[in-house]
Image (spheres, rainbow, N blue to C red):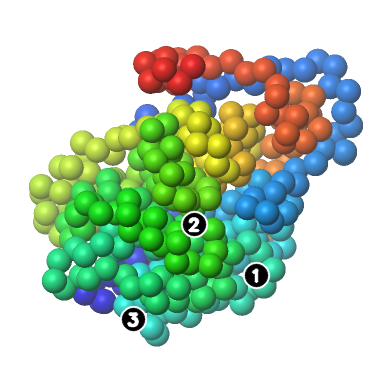
Amino acid sequence: MDELIEQRKADHLRLSAGGDVDALGGAGWDDIRLVHEALPEVDRCDIALATEFLGTPLQAPLFIAGMTGGHRTAHDVNAVLARAAQRHGLAMGVGSQRAALRKGELAYTYTVVREQAPTAFIVANIGAPQLIAQGPANPPLSPDEVAHAVQMVNANALAVHLNFLQESVQPEGERKARGCAEAIARVVREVQVPVIAKETGAGLSRETAVRLKALGVKALDVGGVGGTSFAAIEGLRAEAQGEARYERLGVLLRDWGVPTPVSVIGAIESGLPLVATGGIRTGVDAAKALALGSTLVGVARPLLQAALEGDAAVDVWIEQFLEELRTVLFLTGSGDIAELRNKPRVVTGTTREWLQQLQYC
């Protein structure tokens, strides 16, 4: 099992970086239009991107999404991304830490993050399916193991990821879910850091966001449809293993879920800080997500691809992204992110249909 998990981590990184695995329908950011301000009354050089998340000040609202860990290449990628988080004053997550909890010698692929980013806001990561028994050979993570995941990276927060779409397509997936809600509530009570509930690509409904708040989580990462599809990734893995049943599921469910803009608008009802992850590819996308009410925007695949090229490529990507975001604030007459949230916007197309039919507006 340990070797299987380590190989799966390698597959995920390889396919996420270079495979045809994006959701086909996109996130719907083109449906969100911000209104141009012809007379901005703000100097571009004075625009502030600084923000706060869970009580911690950040230099910009960009969250380097938790992506990887558990094998040698992941160590190198995490090191590059952590150095970028430190340089740019950003928050960063790590990938699922189950590999290191099962096989201690893999911990170095995660601990490198805190080593390279001593003062950054770091988010540890465990899976909701691992909080309950998945069978005799797969007991739930113990409170000590959960605490160890936090301590491993000296984390400021703990993400509990909700990846039941991925588990459904994964040939060796863990598909038991009964009891997960209470298990999350128990983790919230036991850990010493805030807990973030994190979807991994299928989005959150308004009702689920409110349920998660009731469990005690302190923030939500909506992880909506529009970016990397883990159904597509697991479908490709299934194809390579000759598992036709799960390969077919990967094709059918590639675009399953709630698009990111819809998830953000629905999750606002919870009143919790939100991370908009899912199909954020430009600073313009980020501005739209922030205008809709997100606190941070999470980016995974583009930063993973840049990290494989090295530190300089990551810096170029981040600087361009923030330049785009700052420009949109200027063109909407917004001196900071708080002002951007109060600017008018127009919602059209499929996103508008989602909002109307779900009665989010």
Q: Could you tell me which residue is drawn at 87 percent across and 39 percent down?
A: 45
In this rendering, would 287 be left or right of 70?
A: right
Residue at the disc numbered 1: 117
Q: Could you tell me which residue is drawn at 38 percent across and 61 percent down?
A: 186
Residue at the disc numbered 3: 103
Q: Residue furthest bottom?
A: 105
Image spot of residue 191 (x, y percent): 48, 67
Residue at the disc numbered 2: 195
The amino acid sitting under disc 1 is Ala
Real-space Cα separation, disc 3 to disc 2, in angstroms: 24 Å
In this rendering, would 331 be left or right of 345?
A: right
Q: Residues within 10 Å of mark 2 (few under 14, many from 20)?
A: many
Determine which of the numbered discs, if any, sits on residue 332 in the image.
none
Image spot of residue 46 (x, y percent): 87, 38
The amino acid sitting under disc 3 is Lys
| SS at badge 2 | strand
